[in-house]
Image (spheres, rainbow, N blue to C red):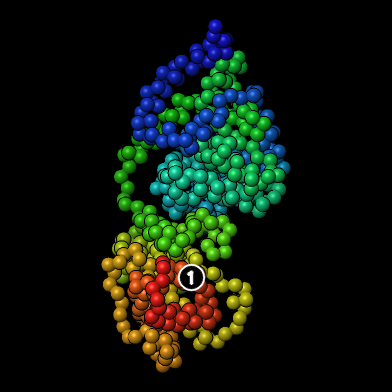
Amino acid sequence: MVSSSAARSRRRSAGQLHALANLQREIQATDPNGRRKYLRDFSEAFRDYESLLTLAQVEAELCQADVVLIGDYHALPTSQRFASQILERLAKCGRPVVLGVETIFARDQHILDEWMRGEIDDDELRERIRFDLDWGYDWEPFRELLVTARQHAGGVYGLDCVPRDDLRKIGRRDRHAAQKIAEISRRHPNAIVVVLFGESHLAPNHIPEVLRLALPDAGIVTLLQNIDHLYWRAAGESREHVEAVRVESDVLCVFNATPLEKYESYRQCIERWRQEHAAPDLAPTFYNLVDALARFLHIDKYAAHNGTQPVYLVDRMPEVYSRPSEEAMRKLLERKGAGEKEMKEIQARIESGGSCYVPRVNAIFVREFQMVGGAEEAARFVHHACRPPASSADEATASSERAKREELFYTRVVEHALGYFGSRLLYPARPGVRGFNLGALSAQPQQAVKEQSRFTGAKFAFATEKLGYMLGSELYDAYLAGRLSKRYIRSLFFRKLHGSAARSTYFQTVCRARTPHKEVIA
């Protein structure tokens, strides 16, 4: 005998189920990932609930939490708008609130901060976080969420990292996000940390499990939205409309849309994606080059605590501006304090190699992709990310203008050397750069190199590039010949270059590259 609850559910849901059948078949034909274990973990986790709740009860419970994990169905605007409402209501609880979002990569936090301070407008934020290219869902509901956060929250943080399109590595994204949420919670100890993340990431053994290990004493509540199995069961309740249910003691689910609305919104997104024909996106090309160098150097992009690794290299990846107008580029650089001389140097590199990495803004400006120039700029970024920044002691050390000039000279030479070496690794067909004997030069620094370090302007740029390329060529030849190990090459990317360190690094490397050694194991 069929229970009255099941009969009620069947009658209420019959029309939707018929409409859903074809819709789900169409989506599954386009997106077969639903059969992946990671997604099954989520779909199989929430099959029943303990009790019914009102929205007022849900909000009262969230006010007592330390972290609220809100499940987001990205294609459904109602999902982001509900998160916006929750954020606004929690701000009235008497405790500060902060927001963390999956939509924005943690590496783009500086862009989000600029928008929060009113330094850039909505359109620039959308373009620079690559919203349409890397996310692709509706912008307006997400923009509304950010505006609400700017009005009511004490901070907004990007939580995600690459790769977004590889389910085999999705566990890394979960661990990264959990670590970021824990850092935010410790940074704002009295606040409610509201997190909007894709619903599949909120299966009990995904982000929540990792986060509880990172924050064992925190009150963590998972707030799901419109879970299918729970929706169909709630349709059998005698109450005309169920607002929310308690799934477990720390898991709640609200109902603000029907399954038909969810899947139809996703189908519309798929259709829109099919019809879009954008210009080629060059950012993945550069990120792939960076990844290749990182693997060669045995760098874990996701390392959080390791003295021999850049911490979270995945969050330090540069912005890539594909074919920016000169006006837009100048505007950005001027805002970051770049002078006319620096902008001319940047423009010259773009003219010669098609692209230029600019450490000041941690960005690569690309006019056209050229393999040689692109590989060199990717290597320059990796070197910049790996080498230690100047300490307060370094900055406090007084030195003459002449000494500072010499330090800058050798720093530029080493930068060019490692940029050239990286480009040869990625593009071995690049011709070698030959010149006078570097070994002889290293023995006579006062007579040769030091004289060049006094050059200025174009002569300075030419001399540093020429010496750097020659040293990079020597390094590559020595590496191929087995005289230099991969470990030694890796160490060069991590060398300190402040004070006299750049000069000593240069001459030590010259000697090492030129001195015959027994072949080493890479």
Q: Amino acid at mark 1?
A: Ser
For the N terminus, give its image quadrant. Answer: top right
Taking the image as shown, residue 476 lies to the left or right of residue 217, namely: left
Q: Nearer the viewer, residue 457 or 509?
A: 509
How busy is the neighbourhood of tag 1: few (under 14 within 10 Å), some, or many (20 plus)? few
Percent across and percent down for residue 497 are 51, 76
> What residue is shown at x 39% (from left), y 59% (from top)?
292
> What residue is shown at x 40% (from left), y 90% (from top)?
448
Percent across and percent down for residue 18 are 41, 18
Q: Nearer the viewer, residue 323 or 270?
A: 270
Residue lying furthest front: 518
Percent across and percent down for residue 492 are 47, 72
How many discs mark residues in the rendered view? 1
- Secondary structure found at label 1: helix
For the C terminus, give its image quadrant. Answer: bottom left
Whether residue 343 is visible to the viewer of this picture, yes or no, is no
Whether residue 122 is visible to the viewer of this picture, yes or no, is yes
Q: Nearer the viewer, residue 70 or 25?
A: 25
Residue lying furthest bottom: 447
